[in-house]
């Protein structure tokens, strides 16, 4: 039975609980949530508190509240942040939500743009490990591409983690294998987001017209000693929402 903790408002904890069930696939598209009264009784809170928590999920488009009940919406509206991905890896050993899967398009040791080699602190002419994947979500035949991702790694990682050069998903994610092989762990992350239009390569991968609007992002994960463990970029088609949790009180 869930139990209210004192670190966050009860309605936030209720929203977080059901959001996780949805993202992990325990509650699927079309599933009905318990009634507000049942949620209130289960959590030991007032019905208005339960309604506020579920109402937050409706605002985020995880659920739809109807007269006959509350139902899980399709997951096409939501997308993981880099922080959410690394958190899931460390907590559950899974890189993506249950209803998502990775299709590896390429995995190679190749020359890349100079800005990537600079980020990895390598010579501009160096070859680096590059992986490209499409993330698909939903149930077949309604499944559709929801993200195009790229990851780059220092070349010596290919010797430590040979799977980086194999064109299939790495169980638990590449970062898990890298942390295990190097003895280093991700200690710091930095994310950048911007809106732009797709190029031809991105359009083909995402199945959208060339020049379609997307949300593009780049992130870098570093170890405590400053070493780059993964640099990545991804782009999301329109109608995908990126969501962040943060505790303002801890910043004061």
Image (cartoon, grey):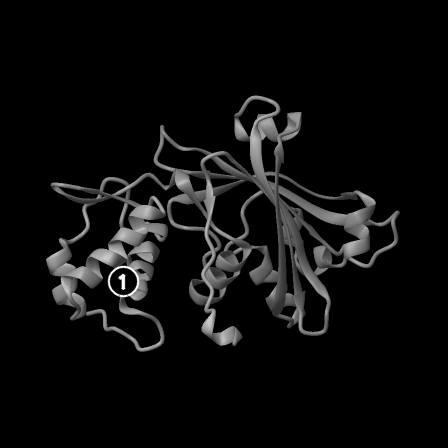
Q: Residue furthest front?
A: 252
Is residue 105 depicted above or below 59 in this figure?
A: above
Could you say which quadrant of the image residue 16 lies in? Answer: bottom left
Residue occupying image coordinates x 47% and y 57%: 244
x then y, percent, for residue 122: 84, 56
Residue 78 visible at all: yes
Q: Is residue 241 left or right of residue 42?
A: right
x then y, percent, for residue 161: 65, 58
Read off the residue under disc 1. 14
Q: Is residue 138 left or right of residue 50?
A: right
Residue occupying image coordinates x 72% and y 58%: 159
Q: Residue furthest top?
A: 209
SS class, disc 1? helix
Residue occupying image coordinates x 63% and y 67%: 188
Is residue 92 depicted above or below 98 in this figure?
A: below
x then y, percent, for residue 227: 73, 67
Along the line of sight, the residue nearer the viewer: 122 or 200: 200
Could you say which quadrant of the image residue 20 lies in? Answer: bottom left
x then y, percent, for residue 139: 34, 35
Along the line of sight, the residue nearer the viewer: 113 or 247: 247
Residue occupying image coordinates x 31% and y 69%: 9
Along the line of sight, the residue nearer the viewer: 186 or 79: 79
């Amino acid at each position: 039975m869930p139990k209210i903790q004192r670190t966050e408002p009860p309605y936030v904890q209720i929203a977080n609980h059901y959001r996780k069930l949805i993202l992990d696939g325990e509650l699927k598209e079309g599933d009905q949530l318990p009634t507000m009264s049942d949620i209130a009784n289960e959590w030991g809170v007032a019905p208005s508190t339960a309604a506020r928590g579920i109402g937050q999920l409706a605002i985020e488009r995880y659920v739809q509240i109807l007269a006959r009940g509350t139902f899980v919406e399709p997951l096409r509206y939501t997308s993981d942040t880099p922080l959410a991905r690394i958190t899931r890896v460390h907590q559950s050993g899974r890189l993506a939500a249950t209803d998502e899967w990775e299709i590896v398009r390429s995995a190679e040791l190749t020359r890349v743009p100079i800005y990537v080699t600079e980020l990895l602190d390598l010579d501009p002419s160096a070859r680096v490990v590059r992986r490209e994947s499409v993330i698909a979500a939903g149930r077949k035949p309604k499944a559709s591409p929801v993200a195009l991702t790229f990851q780059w790694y220092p070349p010596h990682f290919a010797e430590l983690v040979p799977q980086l050069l194999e064109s299939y998903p790495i169980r638990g994610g590449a970062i898990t294998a890298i942390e295990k092989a190097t003895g280093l762990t991700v200690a710091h992350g930095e994310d950048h987001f911007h809106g732009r239009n797709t190029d031809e390569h991105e359009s083909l991968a995402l199945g959208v017209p060339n020049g379609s609007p997307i949300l593009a992002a780049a992130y870098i994960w570093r170890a405590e000693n400053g070493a780059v463990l993964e640099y990545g970029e991804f782009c999301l088609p329109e109608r995908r929402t990126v969501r962040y949790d943060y505790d303002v009180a801890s910043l004061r």
